[in-house]
Amino acid sequence: MDLNLVVLCGRLAVEPELKVFGSGTRLIRFLVTIRSDWPKRRVDVIPVTLWDPPDDLVDELPPKGQRVWVCGSAQRRFWEAPDGRRSRLEIVAEQVNVKDVEELEPIAI
């Protein structure tokens, strides 16, 4: 059995980008900074896409530096560029929380 589940907790690297399409569909793009000390110190910046975000998130987009929790799946996007075919890995979010861990409600499993 395969499983594609990603859970991230980090801070927004830049202000979120909101797009509204002609159909009314909304999209928010985030760049989430993840700091790690193991196995060696590094910083990763992960692109996150959230389709059809809830109204409360759209009405009050979190600022740069805000801690966010993201739950979703990894997906590779492909496109044609002048220098050839390009791709990038991004997280397609199912849920984004802008609360610190102490404020989150426990999840029943």
Image (tube, helix red, strand yellow):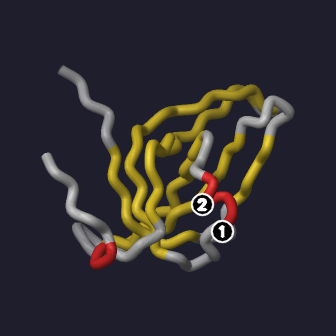
Q: Is residue 9 left or right of residue 65?
A: left
Residue with the mark numbered 2:
57
Viewer-proximal residue among 50 and 52: 52
Q: Is residue 58 left or right of residue 105?
A: right
Q: Amino acid at mark 2?
A: Leu
Mark 1 residue crowding within 10 angstroms, few (<14) / some (14–19) / many (20+): few
Across and down, in percent, residue 19 comes to 77, 47
Across and down, in percent, residue 96 comes to 47, 56
103 to 107, vertically: above or below: below
Identity of the residue drawn at 49% across and 68% down: 33
Mark 2 residue crowding within 10 angstroms, few (<14) / some (14–19) / many (20+): few
Q: Is residue 27 left or right of residue 75?
A: right
Contact (Cβ within 8 Å) of mark 1 with mark 2: yes
Identity of the residue drawn at 75% across and 26% down: 80
Q: Is residue 47 visible?
A: yes
Across and down, in percent, residue 5 comes to 31, 40
Residue with the mark numbered 1:
60
